[in-house]
Image: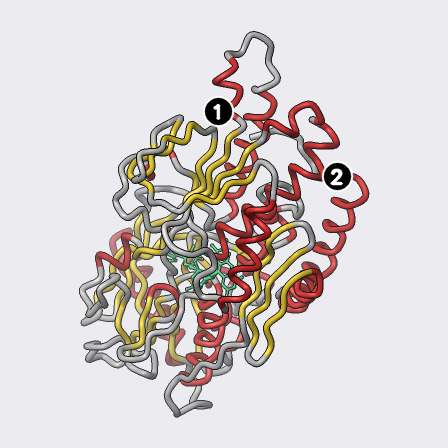
Amino acid sequence: MIKFTRKCFHIKTSLFHRNLTTQTGRKKLVILGTGWGGYSLLRNIDKKVFDVVVISPRNYFLFTPLLASTTVGTLEFRSIIEPVRNVRFRQTADFHLSYATKVDRDNKVLHCESVLQPGLGYTLNYDKLVLAVGARSNTFNVPGVEEHAFFLKDIPDARKIRNRIIQNIELSLHPGLDENERKRLLNFVIVGGGPTGVEFGAELYDWIEQDVARVYHQRKDQVHVTLVESNQILSSFDERLRHFAEKKIKERDRFKLVKSSVTRVTSDCVKLSNGEDLPCGLVVWSTGLSPTQFVKSLDVQKNKSGQILTDKYLHVIGDTTDSVYALGDCADIKDNSLPCIAQVAERQGEYVANLLCGKADKEFTFQSKGMLAYVGHYQGVSDIPNMKMQGITSWFLWRSAYLTKLGSWRLRMQVPMDWTKAILFGRDISRFD
Ligand SMILES: Cc1cc2nc3c(=O)[nH]c(=O)nc-3n(C[C@H](O)[C@H](O)[C@H](O)COP(=O)(O)OP(=O)(O)OC[C@H]3O[C@@H](n4cnc5c(N)ncnc54)[C@H](O)[C@@H]3O)c2cc1C
């Protein structure tokens, strides 16, 4: 009797599982990732056509262009993230806080593991699968980076940086501390002069000028920042804008721009190829991208940087089942490489949503809307098609553009409130883990 009941139960669950597709008449789309690409796909896909399941190790969308502002408290962490469950799911269990670990393409089965309970693995079947898992920071195998440097990719990274900055400045005030150690704690090194490195430097500069000067006034002259870049800073920007940014950074007291590459990072020092040693209390590493462990493990065609190669419809090359797509930072279109930026990933998410629902049949095309970067002290650079701007107008454009791009009205309210609070009351320097 017991045996019979169990068997019945088993048959019932598997029938129920199959019935989901047949009864609803919808196919099952599984999206991996809740970043720019995955979130855009989720928001744009017609849920009358697909049953959508999302797998991601984080249950929020992060507005990355403003992440640097959270490292010093210009903005608060929760002001730039949007819970993905706010995009309504048909079934509550259609979002899983998990990692995808393996894809069995022949049987259209995805292997996942829970983030909340490591070791809790399970499988899911799919009709269509979209890989939008992003990329990780590239350490270029420089010794010590993985162990000692901080990255700036997600909220937990920004939290760690903010804590380290506050911890160092507080520790530097302790009596009995060796003078060299005090200096080291207040030396901050940024490796990589791309937009992320430059914007983090800009936020640090504002914090030193406004908040260190306010609450740690006797330490203001002792905080030093070094930006290390082996080529040019903001290399993807127009030459005139690059020079403007470089000039602004070089003009700043206690700011140094060093043209060199890093050969080693230790717990208290950055060693450069020009022989110089930079003793420091914080290293933020921001030098390009490399594939995640999951992407490395996939048995698909990849480019030299390890990105998944797709055709012009973002369909993974060599996928004979016609069901796997890849987009954003983890993917590269064969013979039409695009930059790894939010604009591309967002547009690709929208494109795949339309393609899968039969609303698009042409190949993917991308028209850049331009690039913006903040360089500190209310100065910005804007490299927009047919318009190059620098200075305060560009800073204003930077703030307004991001404000309108924020994904929800809640964020559009929170961000200006944080900006106003920072101006009126200063940034929050409380330390807690
Ligand atoms: C600090 C910073 C500032 C930036 N500023 C700008 C800017 O101003 N303008 C601009 O255009 N671009 C900017 N970018 C770049 C932009 O954020 C990326 O190009 C964009 O995030 C790529 O989108 P994506 O969807 O491919 O990946 P991501 O947004 O990185 O999302 C990847 C998602 O996949 C999830 N994931 C990872 N592994 C797995 C797995 N195994 N299974 C399931 N899910 C997984 C992750 O948790 C995440 O949710 C910035 C990036 C950073 C870090």
Q: Is residue 154 in sight in this rendering?
A: yes
Inspect this view and state whether residue 127 appears.
Answer: no
Whole-percent x, y for residue 420 in the image? 78, 50
What residue do we see at 54% from left, 66% from top?
240
Q: Position of residue 245 (x, y in %)?
A: 56, 56
Relative vertical location of residue 259 with respect to residue 365 in this rendering, above or below: above
Classed neighbour count for the residue bearing mark 2: other residues with Cα under 10 Å, few (<14), some (14–19), many (≥20): some
Distance between the Cα atoms at labels 2 and 1? 25 Å
- Pointer 1 local density, CA inside 10 Å: few below 14, some 14–19, many at least 20: many
Relative image position of residue 232 (x, y in whole percent): 42, 56
**Residue designated by label 2:** 426
Report the disc number at residue 89: none
- The residue under the point 46% across, 38% down is 189
Pick the residue in front: 381 or 300: 381
Q: Quadrant of residue 124?
A: bottom left
Badge 1 marks a residue whose secondary structure is: helix
Write down the residue under mark 1: 184
* SS type, badge 2: loop
Q: Is mark 2 within 8 Å of ligand 1?
A: no
User: Is 107 or 173 nearer to us in this picture?
Assistant: 173
Rendered-image quarter of ligand 1: bottom left
Left or right relative to 324: residue 76: right
Q: Position of residue 298 (x, y in %)?
A: 22, 62
- Determine the residue positioned at 31% across, 54% down: 292
Count of numbered circles in the view: 2
Name the amino acid, label 1. Answer: Arg
